[in-house]
Image (tube, coloured by chain):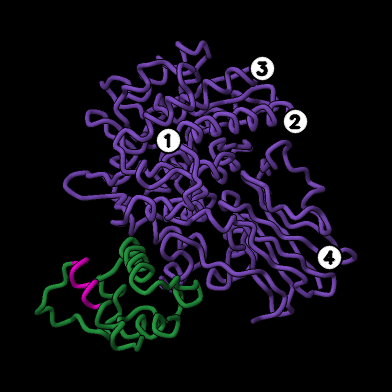
Chain colours: A green, B purple
Amino acid sequence: MDAAAVADRIEKFLREQFLVADDDPRFSRTVDLYEHGYVDSVGLVELLAFIDEEFAVEVPEEALLSPEFSTIDGIAGVVAALT
Amino acid sequence: MTVHFAGPRDANVAWDGTNLARAADFLPGGPPLDGLRGAAASVRGAPSTGWRVYRDPLGINKLFWARDPEGRLHFASRPRVLTAAGHRLADVAAVPCGTVVDITGTGRVARAGSVVPPGWYRDDPDGHAPGIEEIGARIRTTITRYLSALASELRPEEAYVCLSGGLDSSGIAAMAKAIFPSTVAVSFDLKRPGRNPSDDRVAAGRVARDLGIPMLDVSVTEDELLDHLDTVLVEGADWRDFNVHAGLVNAALAAGIAPAVGTRRALVLTGDLANEFLVDYEAETYRGTVYYRLPRLRPAALRSWLVRGLDTSNREVGVFRAFGLPVVQPYAAAVDHYLAIPEEFLTRADRKNALDRIVFGSLIPEHVYTRKKVRAQVGSEEVGGVLAACLDRGIDQAWLRRRFGRLHGVEDDADLDRFVRAGRYRSAVPSPQED
């Protein structure tokens, strides 16, 4: 699966799960999800469970702690590489 | 090549289903350790034999490491020991839960493997899982045998059971009474001027009376409780409120037990881990704000997350160790049976009650089965609790995080996010060489 398609599904999940408004000007695929408060530590667990179920991928710890795993595009890249 | 271990060593109370593991079992060339359950972490060896590094599958005992510029490995059971020795927290990692590593005397990793059973965190049982009656019977047998092994091999003169009056701790107290030569219940309460004893204190007293065991009342003021904050942050190796609040209760209990023990051999037993195994946690609300929020996951996935999260929970082992007390969480011995419980059962509102009637039956008084659950760190509505005691003084999650960072010499807050993420420590297999 290509990274763009993964990013679509992750963005949809984040918007629905964490109630991100459609017109939120700060929210984007390159925003740091943790730094800007869209995802907290508990939310990250929900995101990982979603990735596990949706893409049948278990994110390894080194990827989880990588700088890439903080934006939608970065996460999508990690997940796409694992599928 | 050298390997150093610094600071306190926590008690190893793991067993193989029959006997407790001995110190020699953790030496290089020893048994594979894949069948051990319960708390253990170990770094043993010498340049002439190589070293063996082990951490139990649930990660109950903690083990951290850092590598110095010369490739020497430094281990400790608390991150603070390593940061106090000059390592940056950013360079400290945990040994992954359930890992055995053999390192040769020349510094080569000869073997690194996981002893976590592959089926533990599988959501979909293979269809051969036993029924709940059978699982309950196995849990009862396992815990009974484990407690018997502790009694006969460690020979404690007294077993202190942290008793809240709830199902988990009452079950352990009842079993301990039957197995240990002397069992004492210990009950926590916050002193509040003009208030009655808490629901927990009253319930614990009733259970202790019914079981025929003496009870040690540990009642502390809020000031006395909060005096333990730094101890809990350091020994608990975490800053998150749910662990710190529970750790404060344990610190108060430990401070009450230690002088009563004196120079006698004693064990502390707790009813911890049953909540993780049975997904029996809920978020709590105080003054309109939600605390201890849980991820919105299916029950089996939530159980996996809670159990894996024991990696970062040192609120029992670490905190009691700080007061010189070895603590045992007997439910850990039965982890395989708990994780075999199908998700369907976990969706039942009465799951713990139903299972514990099988496990403990009439060993514990009937009123325990019908009592509403109260968390010690939350308290009842009238009394308040540790959560309120902290928040009312401005000791919130942000405060705890800052204090933990300061105690560990952290200058960049992002280092904390990289130390614990998604409920687990940053972990890596210790190796003298960088990957």
Residue at the extreme right: B48
| Subunit under mark 2 | B
Write the start and end of the magenta stretch as one range: A11-18
Tell me the residue at 78%/71% (across/down). B110
Q: At numbered mark 3, what does the secondary structure look like: helix, strand or loop?
A: loop
Determine if marks 2 and 3 fall on one subunit.
yes
The earlier-in-sequence mark between 4 and 1 is 4
* Label 2 or label 1, whichever comes before in sequence order: 2
Q: Is residue B204 above or below residue B428?
A: above
What residue is shown at x 67% (from left), y 27% (from top)?
A: B148
Q: Amino acid at mark 1?
A: Glu
Query: In this figure, which residue is indicated by the disc labeled 4?
Result: B50
- Tell me the residue that label 2 is attached to: B153
Q: Earlier in the sequence, mark 3 or mark 4?
A: 4
B27 vs B230, nearest the viewer: B27
The reply to whether dot 3 and dot 1 touch (C-beta < 8 Å) is no
Q: Residue at x 57, y 58 (%)?
A: B118
The mark that comes first in sequence, 3 or 1, is: 3
Above/below status of B38 relative to A76: above
Distance (Cα) linking label 4 and label 1: 46 Å
Question: Viewer-proximal residue, A81 or B191?
Answer: A81
Q: Is residue B67 visible?
A: yes
Q: Earlier in the sequence, mark 4 or mark 2?
A: 4
For mark 4, does the 10 Å Cα neighbourhood hold few (<14), some (14 to 19), or many (20 or more) residues?
many
Quadrant of the rendering where the N terminus of chain B is positioned: bottom right
Tag 3 subunit? B
Tell if the residue under mark 3 belongs to the same chain as the one under mark 1: yes
